[in-house]
Amino acid sequence: MWWEYRVAGMYEKGLGTDVNVQEAIRWYKTAADKGHGNAQYRLSLLYGEKQPLTANRYFRMALQTFIREESLSPDAGREYRIAKMLVQLDAAQQGGASFTQAAVSWYEKSAGLGDCRAAYELAKILEHRITGRDGYERMQRYYEMALKGFLRLYRAAGASDRERFALAKRIGEMYLHGDGTPVLETEAFRWFRKAAESGNPSVQYRLGKMYLHGTGCAQDPCMAFRCFYRSAAAGNQYAQYQTGRMYENGSGTEKNNAKAEQWFRTAAENGNQAAQSRLDYRHNQEKYAAFSVVSSLLRMMGGAVGGQIEDSTTRRFGMDRKALRKRRRQKSALGQKDDELDEVL
């Protein structure tokens, strides 16, 4: 049944032939019916969301097969797979029994046989269950075991570029957070730079943050902008927001409000709440600025018109009062009285 599994894998990956998922499924089924655990597991992934009941059936079938095989010949990789599957079951549970403790037991078996991936996953679970100093030290021992294993795998001759990039990212995170090691920001920065060579958007974003704040390196806004821009162009919403902020502030690049708004809008469309808040703030500021300009113009116009009215009124009624006094003097000299028109004026 092993060769049916191999043929299925070649159809699935397009090795020596065109990719043909239906043929891959057919061959995986042949192997699965003969009790091949990996074939059963691959079928659970290929059916996935399209046929969830069938996927779940093959998933549980594979788990049972792996546990049965494990009772015959212990294997660190298989134990790691069993633990991961139990965690997946736990995540899919809507209430009911928890599989986490069973997963912990399988991770411990795998880590005991030297699987650094199992040691790392076990440390992550223990991190949420720390009780006292003993619990913390146990967690750190597993993290330390994982870190040593990851460093060994990174240096292994047979490691692919893809594997090395993933390992460099994991190692950088561990140095940054102090998992199995003291916090070493310069080492974290060095490993993130290795990982960033893959072009991974999340790593580019993380590296940009380190350049921006001077974490493990000298502060360099220009390099931070470059990293954010690459990550933003690849679709990372957090990098899109940071790119907008740097255009807005003129940090690491020339100030450009139009580009800042463009990146804020892109990030907001991808679900970034901070970008949406920034857009709202900018629009409110624009409305306030426009209102202030109009108000100032109205005040200026109002002052000018008021002055004109006052000047014309003063000139008009000033002349009328002079004429009135002159007529009154003339009438008084002739012994006449003021008429009503004069009184009105």
Image: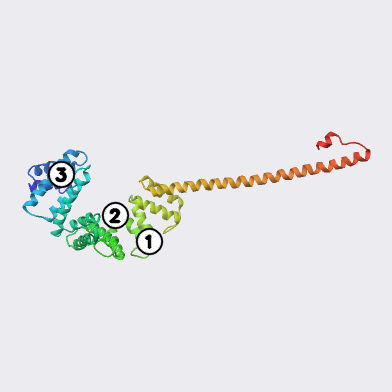
Residue ID at (50%, 47%):
286
Q: Which residue is mark 3?
A: 59
Q: Earlier in the sequence, mark 1 or mark 2?
A: 2
Residue ID at (39%, 53%):
243
Q: Position of residue 63 (x, y in %)?
A: 13, 46
Q: Which residue is mark 1?
A: 213
Does residue 39 appear in this view? no
Q: Residue furthest top?
A: 340
Residue ID at (22%, 56%):
126
Q: Which mark is residue 65?
A: none
Q: Quadrant of residue 77?
A: bottom left
Quick one: SS at disc 2?
Answer: loop
Question: How far apart are labels 3 and 1 at the CA level?
Answer: 45 Å
Q: Is residue 189 left or right of residue 75?
A: right
Three-letter residue code for mark 3: Phe
Q: Are marks 2 and 3 in contact (CB under 8 Å)?
A: no
